[in-house]
Image (spheres, helix red, strand yellow):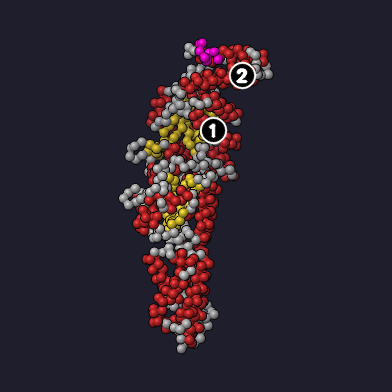
Amino acid sequence: MYEKLNIAQDAAHPPEQQAALLALLRAVQPELDAVVNDFITRFYDELLSQPRFSRVLGLLSETEFAQLRKNQERHLRSLFAGRNAASAHVARHVGRAHALIGIDASWLVESYGLYTRLLIAHFAGWVDPTERADLLGYFFLRLQEELQWQIEGHEDIGRQLDGALARIDSAILTAHTLSDLLRSVLGALENIEGVVAGTLGRPDAAGVLQFEHAFGSRFKSLYLDRIGADGVAPTLVRGDVAEGLGASGRAWRSRQVQFTASYSSDPAILPWKALAHELGVRSAVSIPILDAFGQPIALMDLYSSYPGFFTNAARKVFIEHLQKILGLAFTRYATSPSGVVPYARRQFYVDLLDHDGLQMLYQPVVSLRTGRPVKFEALARLRRQDGAGMVAPAEFLPVLGAQDMWRLFSLGLEQALHARHRWAQQGVDMDVSVNMPPVALSDPRYVERVEQLLRSHALEPRRLTLELLESGDLDASERRDALLARFRATGVRLAEDDLGSGYSSLLRLDSFPFDEVKIDQGLLGGLGKAPRRALDFIQHLTRLAHDLGSLVVVEGLESPGLVEAAVILQADAGQGYGLARPMPAEAVVDWVRNFHLEIDRDHPRTALGVYAAHLLWEMRLTYMTPWPDALPLAARAATALHNYIAVQGLEGGLLHQAYGRLIAALTEGLETTEFRQAQVEMRRQLDQLVRAELGL
């Protein structure tokens, strides 16, 4: 009936051949409906007889399987409609869909072989023999094209997964905080087709999983924001309740990745089944993040709109890699399971920052040489909109990302400079200091903002100090050096915050040109257990900083004794509740006008002060070792302790007796057993004196 077709050519057939082909395809349309359904039934019966295919198809609900059959029928009919511009697009979409439900690319080839074999057998007796070769030849080429396009679509998903891993690997190398890293990780996963939501969280003390990071707007609004409401079950990691029997709870307890291959058939997801249906979630994976000892420290849950998405071989390799990366990341940032910050509270802090909730308080830094304040440090707080007080930085700083930290610095610096200007108008001309995260030395926005505000406020740059916070490693690169040079060029003063809080802070002191350093208040926390050790730290760090040309500020001076000890150990300035608490900007002027610290280095009045004086005296003794004849002079130089004993009425007591034995033993030399024993007893008495002063 129709002339022979040259089907070896592509779409550029002569018009008469294309017309004959189209006529042939139209001619078979009336009988098509009668055979398509039967063909699709035989095709899926064959697939279901093979375990690999039946496992995947078995994940579908009855509704989903019926929809798959309809799509396949529609696809078969499209083959009889001739190729058009949309054919490649549709086939690539089908290939992506196969990838999304976990079908391997090799299975596509195998299923197409089955499709071709059944097509030949099924249609052999249906089409006129004179037309059969032409029609089947056309189908072979179409199916080959379809297979190629579907493989290309399948590979699109693979490239998305590879791209996500590349972004995650890069984030680990460049992120400055764990919060930034986790946001980057979830952002990379969010761009994978078929992944509709993801969370990262840790269980609280009651075993309730608190989600700290998340993506997926509908998931957030329909689940995270409603947890605990009617019909919205929380997720637990305990195994004694239904809410802990899902993949998340099993993953935490087993320390192994757990899959929910299909929400339509897994009884463990019953508490969340209705909600999952509303969200369009069809499968999920729960990935426990393990520390170096194999213990779970966090849990990542990913959700897909396709059943079986996470369960094929390639996807499992991806998940295993992701688990290892996150484990290394948590180890790097030394994150512990304590201090869980739920997603809602984390977002609460960010919202306060974004809606004028930032309020700077000001704590004075007092000169320990003159007793007068020399500057005020601006300390960030977030003011609650309901008037229920303020949020301390220890709560919100760890959860802020890079963009949030930049906004915090920018807004806080502007507030501080405005406050300083108002004080100066009232006759109180004070310097100010503002904390700055280490990321400022790899992000040019910080120095640009400093330059801009110095110009707009017409401020002499040396009146501003930027304190580099101890949180994360500095970017050791040419960019860091260039930005540091730009900060230097502005003329502002640079300070290292929390000297002594970690090894990295000591490295900074050696390699960065700081104008001043602030000794970590955490060093003073051990005063009750080991007073001498804490005072030794202050003394040695002060000498180290002075040797490198930096001024020293001691933080955490919470009592008159600590203030006196810092004075005697020759720190330049002090800061802490023993001097003043942080105050609002409007309280600064009156406080400055009414404050003065009395300083007397030679006559300490507190136990810590006299211990500090004794520490310096012992240090001077070591300088006299080569000249034993000078030791009697050293004995007469121990006036601070002698005066303290007299003023406090401690004559004849244990401290006085220990002092007498020490001075007597000194005349025999520093290396004698008598002197060493007397020295140990003296220190023991001073330890007890300090503990008594501290009420321990």
Provide residue 537's location: percent of width, then percent of height. 55, 28
- Which residue shows up at 48% across the image and 46% down it? 296
Relative depth, front residue between 95 and 404: 95
- Which residue shows up at 50% across the image and 63% down it? 156
Q: What's the CA distance linking mark 1 and mark 2?
A: 32 Å
**Given the image, on which type of amino acid does mark 1 rest?**
Leu
Relative depth, front residue between 176 and 682: 682
Relative depth, front residue between 621 and 339: 339
Looking at the image, is 572 positioned above or below residue 310?
A: above
Answer whether residue 354 is visible to the viewer in this image: no
Provide residue 217's location: percent of width, then percent of height. 39, 53
Asked whether 367 falls inside the magenta stretch, the response is no
Asked where in the image residue 664 lies, by quadrant, the reply is top right
Instruction: Tell me where the magenta segment starts and ends, as one range.
Output: 651-658
Asked whether 652 falls inside the magenta stretch, the response is yes
Looking at the image, is 675 positioned above or below residue 175?
A: above
Provide residue 366's location: percent of width, then percent of height. 48, 26
Q: First in sequence: mark 1 or mark 2? A: 1
- The residue that mark 1 highlights is 499
Answer whether residue 70 is visible to the viewer in this image: yes
Residue 664 is labelled as none
Q: Residues within 10 Å of mark 1 (few under 14, many from 20)?
A: many
Looking at the rendered structure, the secondary structure element under dot 2 is: helix
Residue 676 is labelled as 2
